[in-house]
Image (cartoon, rainbow, N blue to C red):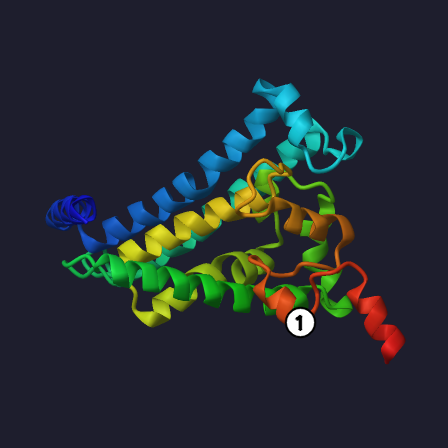
Amino acid sequence: MNLHLNLHSQMQAAWDHVLATYQPGTIEMAGVMGMQIIGFVIPATIYMLIDVVFPKFSQRHKIQTARRQPTRAQIAHCVKVTLFNHVWIVAVHAALTYAAGFDKAMLNLDPTIPGWQTIVTDFIFGLLAREISFYYVHRALHHPSIYAHIHKMHHKYITPVAFAAEYAHPIEHLLANVLPITLPLYLKGAHFVSIMIFTVFELWEAAADHSGYDFLKLPPAEMHDLHHEKFRVNYGTIGLMDWIHGTDVVGWDRAKAKNA
């Protein structure tokens, strides 16, 4: 208990210093860029380096076989497109911040950091909201009338690598990668600290889910790796909505067609 209180007190002191030193818009922009780098770019880079620095470990823990792995040229292309997606999202946020004025905040920068109970509640709310919204957006992107125009780009990597998590058409990146993570907590009015904690976790989870490695069981990368291999299975992020809709088993659609 004392450790939690001390940590919260240190966080509050740091937050007080940030608020007293920088403009609200600057705080938001620094937070947005920091979340992208800490939550996704650094973890995705580490996952990618495992193959180079620890090749034997990599070979033991790759979910799919070596012959199915993307080439270096394909990986380089993936990294470029993914980083572009990060840059344009940050640029849009920067433009909105500039238009509103750096002396104003678009997000909740309340001087008092929420307690641990509120942070945990926000996290669970965000997790469930993201699971539900992402599932239905993802299912929609697999519709035949949409798939070839938008989502097919993401499925270029049948054997995914960490950076492939956000290798996507700009429309998909906004609707499937950005909004399901950020919008629910924004609408809830959650504190910026809660949003940062949740977003960093979700970005790391996306990188881990697409890493192609099985040595981390949470999140279960095998679940999303199977989606990239078989396409019509495991549309969600934590498995809840797939369990509810019965889309967590390969061949669920064939069985449904037979019974129709």
Residue 69: percent from left, percent from top? 73, 33
How many marks overall?
1
Q: Dot 1: within a 10 Å radius of its alpha carbon, few (fewer than 14), some, or many (20 or more) residues?
A: few
Quadrant holding the C terminus: bottom right
Give the percent coordinates (x, y) of residue 110: 18, 61
Question: Which image quarter: residue 50?
Answer: top right
Q: Measured from the top left, where is residue 21 in percent x and y? A: 12, 45
Query: Up-down: is 67 above or below 9?
Result: above
Say which amino acid is labelled 1: His
**Residue 228 is at least partly visible in this image:** yes
Closest to the observer, 53 or 105: 53
Q: Which residue is mark 1?
A: 245
217 or 211, nearer to the observer = 217
Left/right placement of residue 240 relative to residue 182 reads: right
Examine the rendered structure and indicate whether residue 94 appears above or below residue 132: above
Q: Is residue 94 visible?
A: no
Toward the viewer: 70 or 47? 47
Please tell me whether residue 10 is drawn above or below residue 125 in the rendered image: above
Q: Quadrant of residue 211?
A: top right
Name the residue furthest front.
Answer: 1
Extreme residue in the bottom direction: 260
Task: Provide the secondary structure element on which disc 1 rests.
Answer: helix
Residue in the image at 69% along x and 29% along y: 73
| Residue 15 location (% of width, % of height) | 17, 49
Residue plotted at (52% across, 59% down)? 174
Q: For this view, does 253 lie left or right of residue 138?
A: right
Residue visible at 47% across and 44% down in the picture: 204
Please tell me in which quadrant of the rendered image residue 58 appears. Answer: top right
